[in-house]
Amino acid sequence: MSLRELSRMIQQLRESKGMTQRDLADKAKVTPGYVAQLEMGLRKNPSLASLQGLAKALGVSLDDLMTDPREKLRRLKSSEVLREAALGGRTREWFEGALPDYPDPYVAEATKALEKAGFIEKIGDARTYRATEDGRAFLKRNRLDYPDWIIRAPLVNFRKGKRQV
């Protein structure tokens, strides 16, 4: 997340909680000037301790504060696609986002990225995808094969680690 996006996120969260910059500063144990500088994008390298304090004061996790909501949605869709390839029976049209009643560009993007990374592959008549061994191992390693996978999915970064998606 860029500094500009972080600045905007802090301000949006603060305003959504009905807090002033002084309220946030008091709760986060930083100065009001520090909060103002962050929100204006003037503070170039905020410390991890300050960001943790701000996240706690805003009632969100550090990941929620630092991760763009669109990236979280991409992670969720990547998890969903990989799970469907490993556990489900969807057709290729669903994976590629081509169903007229469910046109989801995030699913199509996730499918292409997972296939490129070798986590899923086309099978048979190329109408279906399945998870590769690497894909199944990734699911298991990140506990995305559990029933409550949707809780963890936005936290799993498919772009980090040994295999990047």
Image (cartoon, grey):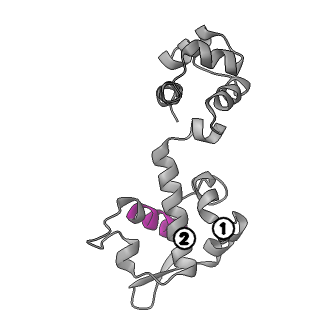
Using the numbered discs, state the Cα–Cα distance from disc 2 to disc 1 in whole angstroms. 9 Å
Whether pointer 2 and pointer 1 mark residues with C-beta atoms closer than 8 Å, the reply is yes
Q: Residue at x 47, y 28 (%)?
A: 12
Q: Which mark is residue 83?
A: none
Badge count? 2
Q: Amino acid at mark 1?
A: Phe
4 versus 63 height, above or below: above
- Write the start and end of the magenta stretch as one range: 108-119
Q: Residue furthest front?
A: 18
Q: Which residue is mark 2?
A: 82
Q: Is residue 131 visible?
A: no
Q: Which residue is mark 1?
A: 138
Asked if the magenta segment contains residue 32, the reply would be no
Provide the secondary structure element on which disc 2 rests. Answer: helix
Provide the secondary structure element on which disc 1 rests. Answer: helix
Which numbered disc flags the more N-terminal residue, 2 or 1?
A: 2
